[in-house]
Image (cartoon, grey):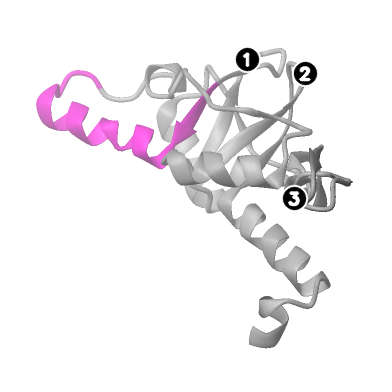
Amino acid sequence: MVKSYQAKMVSPTQDKYPDAGDIMSRPFVTINQDTEVFKAIDTLLRKQISGACVVDADGKLVGFLSEKDCLRLVAEVAYHDNRTGGPVTNYMSKKVLTVNIDVGLIQISELFTSNPFRKIPVMDGDKLVGVVRRRDVLRAIQSHEKKKNHSFSKAF
């Protein structure tokens, strides 16, 4: 809360926007950490997604496998003929940026603009509950602006 120019307490603008729990994608694709990377690539292609959360046998988030991570296979084949494939744990990103379910749209938008990621896993405590994509954020902004009857409504 901040004081307005009239000395009234005003909530930050972010409170007017939805949070991660409101905009996240559900259901979402996960890949088990023991899955062979070529099978994981097949899943990404069939589902037409750019990446997926990697989970252990208990469903706990342990990494993220992106298209970019999978492209490392090309370099391995070119430079190390004897090693191709293996479990996704050999290719996934182990340090995963996540957001809590109550993180606001503005903060999520800032994360996307300052990081190269297309998706961010959404957590409720230590439980993976969804994924928020750049497109989810854009849809939420568009919906919010249409409701307020601002510039988006004039463009459509």
Badge 2 density bin: few <14, some 14–19, many ≥20, Cα 10 Å: few
Q: Position of residue 92 (x, y in %)?
A: 43, 24
| Residue 70 image-quadrant placement | top left
**Residue range of the region highlighted in magenta in the rendering:** 63-83
Badge 3 density bin: few <14, some 14–19, many ≥20, Cα 10 Å: few
Residue 156 appears anywhere in the view:
no
Which residue shows up at 72% across the image and 45% down it? 24
Q: Position of residue 61 (x, y in %)?
A: 63, 20
Q: Secondary structure at mark 3?
A: helix
In whole angstroms, how far apart are the C-alphas of marks 3 and 1? 38 Å
Residue under label 2, please give it: 125
Which residue shows up at 44% across the image and 37% down it? 66
Badge 1 density bin: few <14, some 14–19, many ≥20, Cα 10 Å: some
Q: Which mark is residue 56?
A: 1
Of the residues shown, which amino acid type is indicated by label 3?
Answer: Thr
- Mark 3, mark 2: which one is toward the viewer? 3
